[in-house]
Amino acid sequence: MNKRTILFISDFSRALLIGLLLLFLWTDTVTSIHLIVLAALFGISDAFSYPALNSMVPMLLPAEHLQRGNSIIQMTGQISPILGPALGGSLIAFIGFTGVFTTALVMLFISAVTVLLIRLQEEKEVMEKTPRLC
């Protein structure tokens, strides 16, 4: 399956799940069962996102920028567990849970639409450009 399609479906489905959670919050009907099911579905969708994204990097960057691009992705992956909770807690204090989830919903929709605009190189071209280790 096309990596771009997988990433789009993952982003879009996570946005829909957050939208469903927002609906439960606005109607004041959220229960622990809702949270458990939504978290499980979100995790399943999220599990497809990272492999698709990481495998797209060689198709997006020229070979001479591949090492730099991978290092930036790894750096953000290391920083986000530290900054994410701090930023999330601050946002919850300022705009509340509904505001945070609305922001996440909008960001995931923007991400899904942006993914549709990505034009990938053919895998054969990428294999020809990628330096060989042997």
Image (spheres, rainbow, N blue to C red):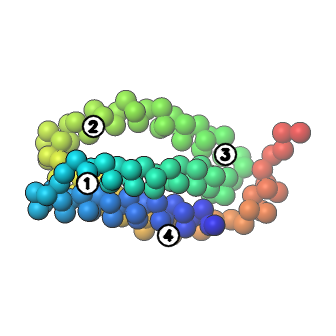
Tell me the mark number nearer the camera, choosing from 4 and 1: 1
Q: Which residue is mark 1?
A: 34
Residue type at numbered disc 1: His
Say whether disc 3 or disc 1 marks the residue closer to the N-terminus: 1
Name the mark on residue 43: none
Question: How far apart are the two marked residues, 4 and 2, measured between alpha carbons?
Answer: 28 Å
Tell me the mark number nearer the camera, choosing from 4 and 3: 4
Q: Which residue is mark 4?
A: 116
Secondary structure beneath label 3 = helix
Q: Is residue 42 left or right of residue 65?
A: left
Residue drawn at 46 percent across, 53 percent down: 44
Crowding at dot 4, Cα within 10 Å, few <14 / some 14-19 / many 20+, comes out as few
Q: Are marks 1 and 2 in contact (CB under 8 Å)?
A: no
Q: Are marks 2 and 3 in contact (CB under 8 Å)?
A: no
Residue type at numbered disc 2: Leu
Q: Which residue is mark 3?
A: 66
Q: Which residue is mark 2?
A: 87
